[in-house]
Image (cartoon, helix red, strand yellow):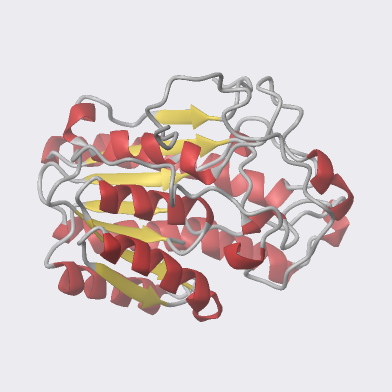
Amino acid sequence: MATKDQLTFDDPTTRHPRITPPEQDQPMPGLDSELEPKADRGEKSYRGTGRLEGRKAFVTGGDSGIGGAVAIAYAREGADVAINYLPEEQEDADTIAKLIEKEGRTCVQLPGDVTNRETCDRLIEQAVEGLGGLDVLVVNAGKQVSKPSIEEITDEQFDLTVKTNIYAMFWMCRAAVKHLPAGSSIILSSSVQSYSPSDHLLDYAMTKAAMNNFGKGLAKQLAPKGIRVNIVAPGPIWTPLQVVEGQPKEALPEFGVGQPIGRAGQPVELAPAYVFLASAESSYVIGETLNVNGGADSP
């Protein structure tokens, strides 16, 4: 029997198991290698069809979770890929790099903290140099910390969340634009939280709403140059982000089961959205927020 991949026809409610993660904790920034249960990033379940042949993509947060799944999918679709991550995530980054290189594609590993402007500028230049150009930028690295009360959100947490989710996005896009030829794509990782904020994710949800607005405005500015900007808004996806303070620990066993589909999503289920938005087949899709959230309401 052939391995089930993203093109297999089946029931989406049971395509991936309804996980019941045990209460667990990891120190920041978290590793896929220590996640229980393991997430499906498409290592065995994503099949490429040549939709990004010859493209040159840079994915922030590309070592794990959604970013890791996107990096794998891009390589299997024919793209060379640069991935950014924190130095503490080297183990996960090495795993993704091996999977990319197994496809015969180039992987440029770029550790660095994107909360620093000079680092963002440097990372874009290194990606361009390492890939021999740049035509896809995926701004995916994010910071999410669950706090039940606004009184518990410290200035330090607020500042780091905004720096990671908003400042880094702005800095990356600003540095990348001069390198992007017509036909290029910028894709931002927003969240269902931008439309339906949880009461324990005030600062995170706020930044994701700002990301939607920024993406739509930048899309209008860059469209005449042939550069498309779009946004993906995931729902509850099982990644290390959830166990490093992203969710209340006691809520982890029920993570995602409240979605109409009845389960949390897996990172590999996001990858086709990012492939579509990077590919030429979405040439008339500009300023769109593509929701991948298991049936939750969205505008």
**16 sits left or right of 256 in the view:** left
The residue lying furthest to the front in this view is 1
**41 sits left or right of 217 in the view:** right
Quarter location, residue 12: top right
Is residue 93 shown above or below 5? below
Quarter location, residue 140: bottom left
Nearer to the camera, 4 or 91: 4
Which image quarter is the C terminus in? top right
The residue that appears at 59% across and 62% down in the rendered structure is 32
Nearer to the camera, 14 or 290: 14
The residue that appears at 37% across and 78% down in the rendered structure is 118
Mark count: 0
The residue that appears at 13% across and 63% down in the rendered structure is 133
The residue that appears at 36% across and 62% down in the rendered structure is 99
Nearer to the camera, 143 or 155: 143
Q: Position of residue 113 (x, y in %)?
A: 48, 75
Which image quarter is the N terminus in? top left
Is residue 52 shown above or below 87? above
Quarter location, residue 11: top right
Q: Position of residue 52 (x, y in %)?
A: 19, 44
Nearer to the camera, 113 or 293: 293
Q: Position of residue 37 (x, y in %)?
A: 69, 53
